[in-house]
Image: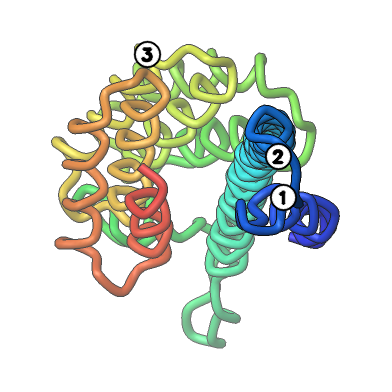
Amino acid sequence: MQKLILVLAFLIPGVVLAQAPVSKLGSGSVEERLEQLERVMDARNAAQMALLDQMASLQSEVAELRGQTEEHAYQLEQILQRQREIYQEIDRRLNATPPPASNDTAVSTAMPVAESGNNGGSDYSSDLSENDAYDKAIRMVMEDRRYDAAIPEFRKFIENFPNSTYVPNAHYWLGQLLYAEGNFAEAKAEFTAVVEQFKDSNKRADSMLKLGIVAQQQGEKELAKSYFDKVIAEYPSSTPADLARQRLANL
């Protein structure tokens, strides 16, 4: 904006001078007046062309800045998404700590609590190897940052424990990892599994949002819009709904 003001400050005096009335062109023959008029017109045209060039340059710079702003907003959204996922997993781990056993009911083995919003199973898993397998895959993501190694671990978990209460979460994390690798087709399949097969999963809203983002990345704007609208309609007060609204505003 400051650059535009400076440009106008330099150019407007020239334009005003170039648009001086013919009556002020001075005396002389008709031919002399015509030459003066031509010079005035040439000066005005040159000033207008310079102004148009400056305006075009400024518009290009504004478009470039807008693109950078949108890119930064997307990166910030990804960071916030990652932070939210970490907080959710921390909360799951805190909830996995059982209350102290009473004197009458001592337990020798701590059973982790399944995450809320699962596929309708019991609140506690009855298979320690199931818990160990899921925690191993989660640790690869949350602690070790071994994302490539975590992908086969989640796939193995889903194959070995198809009825586990952790299955929708495993699909979700697998989708996240595949999405991060740019494997949109397989990521879409994992998020779709959560949305269609686990209606009560607490990962369903996030998975639906991710389906919209995948569609947007693939240039399918109408499909992306339908997913974002669905997130807002079904989970209006959720964080994924807020992110969906932001996406729609920039779609």
Q: Residue at x 78, y 50 (%)?
A: 14
Residue 164: horizontal and vertical position, in percent? 31, 38
Q: Name the residue under label 2.
A: 40
Q: What element carries label 2?
A: helix
Residue 214: horizontal and vertical position, in percent? 38, 27
Toward the viewer: 102 or 39?
Answer: 39
Query: Does residue 26 lie above or below 54 as drawn?
Result: below
Distance in Å between CA atoms under marks 2 and 1: 9 Å
Toward the viewer: 134 or 168?
Answer: 168
On the rendered structure, is 44 left or right of 228?
Answer: right
Can residue 225 be seen here? yes
Q: In the image, what residue type sits under mark 1?
A: Leu
Among numbered discs 3 and 1, the one appearing first in the sequence? 1
Q: Name the residue under label 3.
A: 186
Image quadrant where residue 124 sits: bottom left
On the rendered structure, is 246 left or right of 144?
Answer: left
Callout 2–callout 1 Cβ contact below 8 Å: yes
Distance in Å between CA atoms under marks 3 and 1: 76 Å
The 10 Å Cα crowd at callout 3, few under 14, some 14 to 19, many 20 or more, is some
Q: Mark 1 points at which residue?
A: 25
Q: Residue at x 61, y 50 (%)?
A: 73
Q: Is mark 1 on a helix, strand or loop?
A: loop
Callout 3–callout 1 Cβ contact below 8 Å: no
Q: In the image, what residue type sits under mark 2?
A: Val
Toward the viewer: 44 or 40?
Answer: 40
Q: What element carries label 3?
A: helix
Q: Seen from this angle, which residue lies furthest front? A: 29
